Image: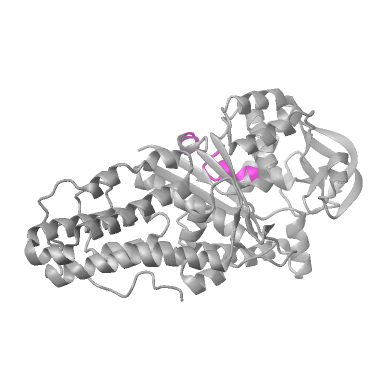
């Protein structure tokens, strides 16, 4: 069975999760479930980034020790992921010993190789970004809370690997998508790459992983956080497990953390002599009124509120189908209701009710026999290029093709009119309804990575638990059940 290793960024615990966190995690979960559906063995990692200045400041603001603050915040993410039906393989927190010991091992290894050195640095430091910025960045006005700092620190020889990294990105050995993000990274790398400051003196920041070669310093939060992708799967602790999973098939990220993942992280791996991830995919932002959702703007939508109002599967469906990967998408309650009523209530939900009611009333609540091997519906099913689109991470297209297939069932019903046919040719009506029911089974299975709960309800109505994506697996004679509408309309 082929492996598939997918990761989300690990999320900062300085605040509660919002729709941006929810989107990335649902996306990773959906992709992971799809990979399992086509016969692969996915490993899906998510977690929390618990070190750094912002976490320390948030803890101080709440009158708590940093670790206590992290322990208090972590359940908000864990509980939300449970509510969102996130089926992760592993959840890592960077304060866990299994992570901190590997970060220190890596620091020691990179230091001993000569790729870490001490130097005095004077420059502009962005508190919000927790990094030194260039004069050009300073003049852009995009960085708040900036101050000038002069201090001795440890630096990673990132510049040493610039040429190698450019070659690997240009040749797609490190595939950065969409192409606009690849061009953005290559544009950044046209300038001389500076070495990366990877320490913070304890006099300024105490909350971090201590450098193994100098206990007066802690590790820069990004050097610590990025290592989670390999510490969680056994780097330098379980060689067999690590070699079976690494390199990652895809790091899913938001476009605002592109540089750290496409420049910092690959150069760290090059220094360690480890393979680079196969793909880094930077998705867009969710917008309201064309603005990025942010706490400072007061336009953050709570995914918990959406779930409570409309149900978790409906929210997952909207988020997965509405955003073209790589581009921004705009959220509004109006667009949500329109998509829900059109796709789910009308096209999918009504069809389930229609088919199951016809079978109940005319075939003793049992899936009818079928002597018809093929139909327009079986042909339509065969045309769905599931794996090809998944390999391209075209989740919105996958969903659109499945919904097109569902709409073709409605067309097939209208063309064949089994409610009339049953009076003159019950056998042929049974053929028609079997093909409709089997198509609904396959549609539910294909949409199960997006809507795991509602699609299970549909399979229950059809009296089956067969999730094989092969035509004809629905057993004739299986007893169906009728329930309340799967997707009641939003009025």
Compare residues 384 and 175 and report the one nearer the observer.
Answer: 384
Residue 363 is drawn in which quadrant?
bottom left
Instruction: Pinpoint residue 318: horizontal percent, then vertical percent.
Output: 49, 60
Instruction: Pinpoint residue 142: horizontal percent, then vertical percent.
Output: 81, 50
Compare residues 42 and 215 and report the one nearer the observer.
Answer: 42
Q: Is residue 394 left or right of residue 256?
A: left
Does residue 15 belong to the magenta stretch?
A: no
Residue 222 is drawn in which quadrant?
top right
Compare residues 139 and 204 and report the one nearer the observer.
Answer: 139
Does residue 229 belong to the magenta stretch?
A: yes
Residue 192 is drawn in which quadrant?
top right
Magenta stretch?
A: 225-243
Instruction: Pinpoint residue 130: horizontal percent, then vertical percent.
Output: 78, 49
Asked if residue 92 shows in the view, the reply is no
Q: Is residue 198 left or right of residue 250?
A: right
Asked if residue 162 shows in the view, the reply is yes
């Amino acid at each position: 069975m082929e492996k598939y290793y997918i990761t989300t960024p690990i999320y900062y615990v300085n605040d509660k999760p919002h729709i941006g966190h929810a989107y990335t995690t649902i996306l990773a979960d959906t992709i992971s479930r799809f990979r399992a559906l086509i016969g692969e063995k996915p490993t899906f990692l998510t977690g929390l980034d618990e070190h750094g200045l912002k976490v320390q400041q948030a803890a101080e603001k709440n009158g708590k020790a940093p670790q206590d603050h992290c322990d208090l915040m972590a359940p908000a993410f864990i509980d939300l992921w449970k509510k969102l039906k996130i089926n992760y393989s592993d959840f890592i927190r960077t304060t866990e010993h299994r992570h901190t010991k590997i970060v220190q091992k890596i620091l020691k290894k990179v230091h001993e190789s000569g790729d870490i050195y001490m130097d005095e640095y004077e420059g502009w430091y962005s508190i919000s970004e927790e990094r030194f910025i260039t004069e050009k960045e300073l003049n852009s006005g995009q960085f708040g809370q900036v101050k000038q700092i002069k201090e001795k620190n440890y630096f990673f020889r990132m510049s040493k690997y610039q040429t190698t990294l450019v070659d690997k990105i240009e040749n797609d050995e490190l595939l950065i998508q969409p192409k606009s993000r690849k061009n953005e990274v290559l544009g950044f790398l046209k300038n001389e790459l500076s070495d990366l400051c990877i320490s913070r003196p304890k006099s300024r920041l105490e909350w971090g992983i201590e450098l193994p070669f100098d206990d007066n310093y802690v590790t820069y939060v990004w050097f610590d956080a990025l290592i989670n992708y390999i510490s969680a799967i056994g780097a330098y602790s379980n060689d067999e497990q690590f070699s079976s999973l690494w390199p990652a098939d895809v790091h899913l990220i938001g476009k605002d953390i592109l540089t750290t993942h496409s420049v910092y992280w690959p150069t760290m791996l090059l220094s360690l002599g480890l393979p680079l991830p196969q793909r880094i995919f930077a998705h867009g932002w969710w917008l309201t009124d064309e603005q990025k959702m942010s706490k400072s703007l007061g336009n953050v939508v709570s995914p918990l509120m959406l779930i409570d109002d409309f149900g978790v599967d409906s929210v997952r469906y909207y988020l997965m189908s509405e955003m073209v990967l790589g581009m921004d998408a705009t959220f509004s309650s109006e667009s949500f209701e329109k998509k829900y009523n059109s796709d789910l209530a009308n096209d999918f939900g009504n069809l389930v009710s229609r088919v199951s009611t016809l079978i109940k009333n005319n075939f003793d609540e049992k899936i009818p026999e079928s002597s018809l091997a093929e139909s327009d519906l079986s042909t339509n099913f065969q045309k769905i290029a599931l794996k090809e689109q998944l390999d391209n991470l075209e989740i919105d297209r996958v969903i659109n093709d499945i919904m097109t297939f569902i709409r073709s069932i409605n067309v097939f019903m209208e063309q064949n009119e089994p409610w009339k046919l049953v009076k003159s040719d019950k056998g042929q009506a049974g053929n028609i309804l079997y093909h409709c029911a089997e198509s609904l089974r396959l549609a539910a299975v294909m949409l199960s990575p997006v809507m795991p709960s509602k699609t299970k309800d549909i399979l229950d109505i059809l009296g089956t638990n067969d999730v094989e994506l092969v035509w004809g697996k629905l057993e004739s004679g299986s007893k169906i059940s009728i329930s309340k509408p799967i997707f009641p309309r939003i009025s």
